[in-house]
Amino acid sequence: MDPTQASSQQAASRTAILGAARPRYGEKLIRVILFAFALVSVLTTTGIIVSLLGNTIDFFDVVSIWDYITGGEWSPLFSDPKFGVWPLVNGTLLVTAVALVVAIPLGLGTAIYLSEYASRRVRKAIKPFLELLAGIPTIVFGYFALTYFTPVVLKQFLGIEVGSFNALSAGIIMGFMVLPTIASVSEDGMSAVPASLREGAYGLGASKLQVSLRIVFPAALSGIVAAIVLGVSRAIGETMIVLIAGGQIPNTGIDPREAFETMTAFIAATGKGDVPTGSIGYQTIFAVGFTLFVITLLLNAVSIRFVRKYRQVYE
Amino acid sequence: MNLSRFLITVVATATVAVGVTACGGSDTSSSASTDAGAAVSGSIAIDGSSTVFPFAQAAAEEFQTKNPDAKVTVGESGTGGGFEKFCNGEIQIADASRSIKDEEIALCKKGSIKYSEVQIANDGIAIVTNKDLKITCMTTDQLKALWNKTSTVSNYKQLDPSFPDVKVSLFGPGTDSGTFDFFTEKINGKKGDTRKDYQPTEDDNVTVQGVSGEKGGLGYFGLSYYADNTDKLNLVAVNDGSGCVVPSAATVQDGSYKPLSRPLFMYINEADFTPAVKAFMGYVVDNADAIAKNAKIVAMTPAQQTEAKAALSKAEAGASGATTTTG
């Protein structure tokens, strides 16, 4: 045997000892299967985009993108149709804003209380209710808003002059729906702040409030921002509450006591009705759906960059 | 027991207690008892006008009680939506609050659907306002000024100085609705001619909810929806030049409630004239009076009833000529 052969044989036997005695085909198979599972989510998202895109392109063959984005009136199903999407976007943004005004203070306040102030017993008592709130179906929220919140709480109790369908009621109830999401994700973020930071502050004589707001809160900021962005995404994409309680009138105003149609409510109501397949009314569903998708995508992209920039990794 | 378990038990018990007391008894309705002989089986799909819906629903319930093996489903996609499904062959009976349109006739021809039209009831379109908005009568000109395509009326005082000074808030059927087509044609002069800033819906109950909840609420729908909600709504009489007429079964039947009176139809697919459909339509035509009373819909006059029976017989004759025997 010449020297090269001998050394390659030695090398082969060395790798054989370091690696497995024989190749494990089972491991390879599992890896491929699990990869396929992960691939399903990519394929599903791609599939959705492709299905939206087809009809959206057909839509923009008829309606110019400029008219769509800048037009101020949305009435695609009437005899003299107008295709300006702004009223729907306005409705979505307004209801989301109202929801956030409710959900962010209450959610963050709940999170701070549960992570910094509450005793173990109180925490164990309150957490199930938070989870229960998160589990209530949105259609139940919608009917609650329409049949109880608007007539009894807003009109009778608080005496506010609202319409039967209004963005205020839908927004506040949506805030309650989003609240558990914001509360639990920010609470996770706050719990991840190491105790050493808190203890250092206490050691220097800080009060509990100072520790919560000036030590823990900034340290957990990326988690809190992630929670808020998650809440915003849920609010923007929420359909049932606005469909039932928000109204079906496209509205460019900003008074939440009026009825506002959101993008999601439009898609649901038109889809439920009977527009002939392939007609321009049918294509509006896809165009608005695509718009919603783009907005959510932008929101996610911004939030990922923000979170990455401010994330603090602890040893 | 610990705090959270106690709280959950309290909440659960309270919920159950409220639920039990809130559930009222179901309303039973009596109806005529003419039997069509042996019970039939099979399924019937009905869809279309939301105005005809209470009638079709009442008929379906009674029919299914007498024929437990029959399954009748009733939808309310609007007259336009119903015709589309009908001409596609998706349903056997289309409820309609107007006659079939030309483009729908063409659609049915394309789908090779031969149909028969049978009148089953009458209807008046009720103009309703919020209980606190006391308007007793409106002329057809005022309605046109309020609802037409170019209308910018935002306060009832603009229509008439004697009307209350309240902001206008409009509700009504959407573009798929036969009620919408009929109202816009009779009041505004052209089908589909309407202002756009109102709350459209195919479900007239949503209109009831909207109008009853808003001080300046005004809406329009079939009379039966008013009859079901007299405690929440104020009915407006309509004056088309010959005096204010309040819509009611009597004024709709004798034609004095103008121009918003109209017949209600069921369109039958002659090619799909199964024994179940035949039995159902026979039941409907024979008991139209009782069903209409049940559903709070205006019944047909005796003359119209005779015509309906004749139309149905003609449909049966046409169907048996067109179809082969079904098991």
Image (cartoon, coloured by chain):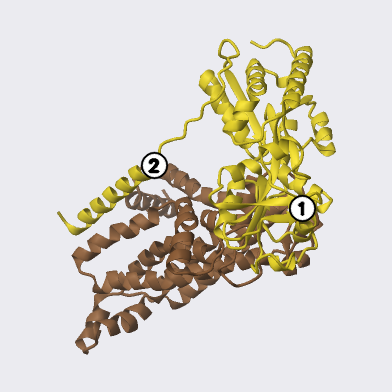
Chain colours: A brown, B yellow
Local SS, label 2? loop
Query: Are the residues at dot 2 and dot 1 in contact (C-beta closer than 8 Å)?
Result: no
* Quarter of image, res B164: bottom right
Which dot, 2 or 1, sits closer to the camera?
A: 2
The residue beneath circle 1 is A58
Q: What residue type is labelled 1?
A: Asp
| Residue B139 drawn at (x, y percent) | 76, 55
Residue A297 visible (yes or no): no
Q: Is residue B320 above or below residue B258?
A: above
Q: Is residue B44 above or below residue A257?
A: above
Chain that bears disc 1: A
| Residue B168 drawn at (x, y percent) | 66, 64
In the visual, does B35 lie left or right of B252?
left
Q: Is residue A82 above or below residue B321?
A: below
The residue beneath circle 2 is B23
Q: What residue type is labelled 2?
A: Cys
Determine the residue located farthest toward the bottom in the rendered image: A204
Determine the residue located farthest toward the left in the rendered image: B1
| Residue A283 drawn at (x, y percent) | 72, 51
Residue under the image location 34 percent in, 57 percent down: A131
